[in-house]
Image (cartoon, grey):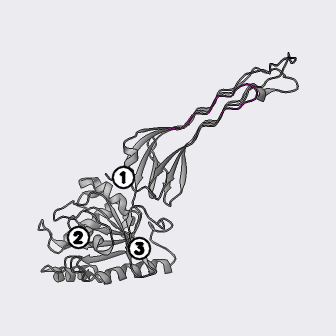
Amino acid sequence: MFVDRVEIEVHAGDGGSGCMSFRREKYVPHGGPDGGDGGNGGSVVVVASEGVDSLTALAHRKFWRAEKGGRGEGSNRHGRSGQDLTILVPPGTVVIDAENQFVLKDLIRPHEQFVAARGGKGGWGNAHFKSSTHQAPREFTEGERGERRRLIFELKVIADVGLLGKPNAGKSTLLSRLSKARPAIADYPFTTKHPNLGRVQVDLDRSFVMADIPGLIEGAHAGVGLGLEFLRHVERAGILVHLIEPSPLDGTDPILNYRAIRNELRQYNERLCERPEIVAVTKCELPGAAEVRQRLAEELQRDVLLISAVTGQGLNQLTGAIARQMAGCEDEGQRPPAVAGSAPDHPPSIEQD
């Protein structure tokens, strides 16, 4: 099961209390203070790990607690510090404070980490308070309480290219044709329930990561059809490839479908409409595909590709156009917003050629 949003509660470990103790040995009737300090509590640390591709493991456990620090003891023995608790998440996970609804950390690269809740400091034993004028202190302090927080984890898939389109536009078929990814494919809408990633090899030296985003429908920006969950994954795609089905099953007009998806992007986040976009009419073996391509090209005043994931027609032109678009962004010194400094060398859950 693919999970891309969870809410959990984390408790860092409390610090151990200091000890009040005095040295008592034979022939030393008035020994000084020897109470040890308490150990520090363990912290809760969130780490982006390459081997994790979903938040599923967090969905079944809502409460996470780090280890407490040990109490100080006599003979100047300090308490053991509690072990940190590590929570592994996929790269691309955003950590949000659930109570105040602000972003604490965006874990983009593998091995990035964030201390979500800091452990309490250990208390002082009475040996800590000894001075030349206060040689038999009885003071000691309790350990500090560890931080407690409710966190929301949101996964936004990291990809160089995001495939957009209405349900059943051929996104999954295209991804399976260009890479070794094997998403679910069927001749009905909403076959894809979660994003799928695949690495597309352009040549020996160039490749890119492509994400198959589940189909969008009107009202997606307001949550219709799980739209918010799907649109979240578009945010990190540096280049958008918009696939247009020439003969939709529901009989709708392909041009109006294109406009509807662009409107949903604008309603969700206006900056998404500023991303580089490649438009392609899919299923070019169907009657009317060439006419739809011509209409789109006239409306957009730019080139529109004609491709088929079944026959392979136009796929070389598509991968070439994507590669040129990526190279153009790099030459200008401004990679697409979602890709700049964000795409890991080996993104999670990617099938490679």
Mark 1 secondary-structure assignment: loop
Q: Which residue is mark 2?
A: 170
Q: Position of residue 127 (x, y in %)?
A: 78, 27
CA–CA distance between discs 2 and 3? 19 Å
CA–CA distance between discs 1 and 3? 22 Å
Note whether 131 is above or below 89 in the view shown.
above
Write down the quadrant of residue 348 in the picture.
bottom left
Mark 3 secondary-structure assignment: strand
Q: What residue do we see at 40% from left, 58% from top? A: 156
Closer to the camera, 256 or 207?
A: 207
Residue type beneath disc 1: Asp
Q: Position of residue 224 (x, y in %)?
A: 24, 54
Q: Which residue is mark 3?
A: 208
Q: Earlier in the sequence, mark 2 or mark 1?
A: 1
Write down the quadrant of residue 274 in the picture.
bottom left
Q: Which residue is mark 1?
A: 4
CA–CA distance between discs 2 and 1? 23 Å
Q: Is residue 70 magenta?
A: yes
Q: Position of residue 319 (x, y in %)?
A: 35, 80
Q: Earlier in the sequence, mark 2 or mark 3?
A: 2
Residues in magenta? 65-79
